[in-house]
Amino acid sequence: MLEITALSHTYPDGHVAIRGMDLAVGDGELVSVVGPSGCGKSTLLRCIAGLIPPSGGQVLLDGDPVRGVPDGLAVVFQDYSRSLFPWLTVRDNVALPLRRRGMSKADRRAAATEALESVGLADAGRKYPWQLSGGMQQRVSIARALAYKPTLLLMDEPFGSVDAQTREDLEDLVLQVHRAEKMTILLVTHDIDESVYVGDRVVVLGPSPTGVLADVPVALPSVRDQIETRAMPEFIRTRATVGRLVRGDRSALEKMDTKNTDMAGLRGAYKDA
Ligand SMILES: Nc1ncnc2c1ncn2[C@@H]1O[C@H](COP(=O)(O)OP(=O)(O)OP(=O)(O)O)[C@@H](O)[C@H]1O
């Protein structure tokens, strides 16, 4: 269980990125996070990953405050170019974190090969990251995270640099791995359709300094299909609600179940708009 209470983060230059955020994510949930550009989504993930300390409030993982990178955590960063080691082959990049799992060399290689196959890069194992396109490098980062089989997976705009077809395939791969491994996933995305398609719920963040504006339930069957699910009335309704909220349209909240919604936060955020 991930619990974020009254979380604030102020950068050393005085910029307040997050103010008073509360959010709880249950074990095995897949939560999409959306919000206006620059609102503080990556800052939130960095706080959860223990890469930057909260300035106020706390992040609790299974009841313990996060102080440093937690065990069982994997992160897929937005900036894939800095997340792979250029001197290691693609397969060795994927296999490297598995050392922490105490796996034998043969098992690490087998797991890396399987993960690369799952992201459509079966033939790239012997290459080096710099020999691959940006989209392929991002798929290697995703393979590395999936091979690790984390209990908590943080993904920051993970499909931003891949083509539309690959993006859909990777969305389905994440859903499939999530079902099989029952890991908890927080996925930050700019794509509102994607947030609804993959999420059990969509957390909408407000403008900077950010907090949770709305927690939108996604009442879709857990097994999803790119064509059928996106044509469902519930998908279209939820997408419209999330889209309006991200654009700052307060009327979207009045039309939805506000049980999980921080109405006070929303009013505060849009008070001066
Ligand atoms: N190291 C830093 N020092 C000072 N300010 C920062 C730093 N990193 C981010 N910020 C600021 O904090 C705010 C939130 O940044 P963050 O990257 O978390 O937003 P985001 O929602 O992930 O952005 P995007 O949607 O563009 O990816 C922005 O105003 C950004 O300029």
Image (tube, rainbow, N blue to C red):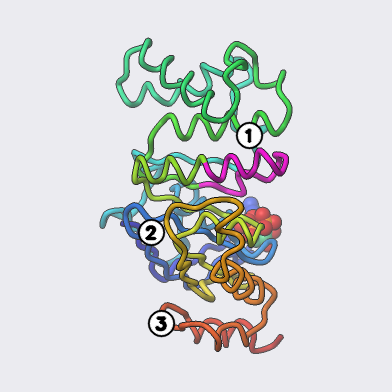
Q: Percent position (x, y) of residue 138? A: 63, 34
- In the picture as drawn, the residue positioned furthest to the left comes out as 63
Give the magenta part as a residue range.
Answer: 155-172
Ligand 1 in which quarter: bottom right
Q: First in sequence: mark 3 or mark 2?
A: 2
Q: Percent position (x, y) of residue 160? A: 68, 45
* The stretch drawn in magenta includes residue 53: no
Mark 1: few, some, or many residues within 10 Å (few <14, many ≥20)? many
- Amino acid type at circle 1 is Gln
Label at residue 188: none
- Mark 3 lies on a secondary structure that is loop
User: Which of the pair 238/127 is nearer the observer?
Assistant: 238
Task: Identify residue for label 2.
Answer: 59
- Amino acid type at circle 2 is Val
Q: First in sequence: mark 3 or mark 1?
A: 1
Which residue is located at x 68 percent, y 41 percent? Answer: 165
Task: Identify residue for label 3.
Answer: 259
- Amino acid type at circle 3 is Lys
Task: Identify residue for label 1.
Answer: 138
The answer to whether any part of residue 52 appears in the image is yes
Which residue is located at x 43 percent, y 26 percent? Answer: 97
Marks 3 and 1, Cα distance to the nearest angstrom?
37 Å
Q: Does residue 159 lie above or below 61 as drawn? A: above
